């Protein structure tokens, strides 16, 4: 018996919607990463993008445990000498709440050629409205 290897045309993609209001950042990012990669499907293969689309709403209302709101920093570097910049989670939540969830999920996706393709299936919105009603997303329950 031969081992089955999924092809791109064999993959059935579903749209899911997640409400991030009052959910813990790490636990939510784990659920999203599993759906994006397709690890919950029986046809999963690490060399093929088998995942589904995920829409995240209310990203501005995400919760974190402990004192991370003040103690957690996000770093960027311009490439120039002394070009390191850091922002606390609280300030980034006010400016770009979508970026927090994106970075958390991106850290859980393998760093390979499929990463960009997998991350392109993640749609994040700061408020309760989104632009993907036509895809009829199902609520993500886990």
Image (cartoon, rainbow, N blue to C red):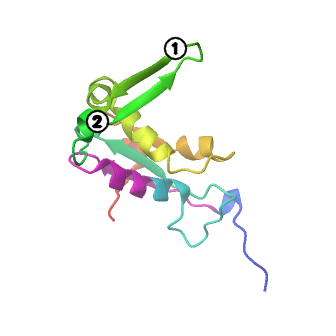
Q: Which element is circle 1 on?
A: loop
Q: Is residue 128 visible?
A: no
| Residue at the extreme front of the image, as rendered | 82
- Horizontal side, residue 61 vs residue 31: left or right: left
Residue 2 x, y percent position in the rendering: 79, 81
Note whether 106 is above or below 11 in the view shown: above
Closer to the camera in the image, 36 or 81: 81
| Residue at the extreme top of the image, as rendered | 81
Q: Is residue 21 visible?
A: yes
Q: Is residue 123 magenta?
A: no
Dividing the picture into quarters, in which one does residue 74 lie? top left
Note whether 43 is above or below 92 in the view shown: below
Please name the residue that numbered disc 2 is placed on: 71
Choose the circle earlier in sequence order: 1 or 2: 2
Residue 138 x, y percent position in the rendering: 36, 56
Q: Residue at position x 39%, y 51% from top?
A: 29
Dividing the picture into quarters, in which one does residue 100 lie? top left
Q: CA separation, marks 1 and 2? A: 22 Å
Q: What span is colored magenta in the figure?
A: 11-32
Please name the residue that numbered disc 1 is placed on: 82
How many C-alpha atoms fall within 10 Å of the one at disc 2: few (<14), some, or many (≥20)? few
Q: Which element is circle 2 on?
A: helix
């Amino acid at each position: 018996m031969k081992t089955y290897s999924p092809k791109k045309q064999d993959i059935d993609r579903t749209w899911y919607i997640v409400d991030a209001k009052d959910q813990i950042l790490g636990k939510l990012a784990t659920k999203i990463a599993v759906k994006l990669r397709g690890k919950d499907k029986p046809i999963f293969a690490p060399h093929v993008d088998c995942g589904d689309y995920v829409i995240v709403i209310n990203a501005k209302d995400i919760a974190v445990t402990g004192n991370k709101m003040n103690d957690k920093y996000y770093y960027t570097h311009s490439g120039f000498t002394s070009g390191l910049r850091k922002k606390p989670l609280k300030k980034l939540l006010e400016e770009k709440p979508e970026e927090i969830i994106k970075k958390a999920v991106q850290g859980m996706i393998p760093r390979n050629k499929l990463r960009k393709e997998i991350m392109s299936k993640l749609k994040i919105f700061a408020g309760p409205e989104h632009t993907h009603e036509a895809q009829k997303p199902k609520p993500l329950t886990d």
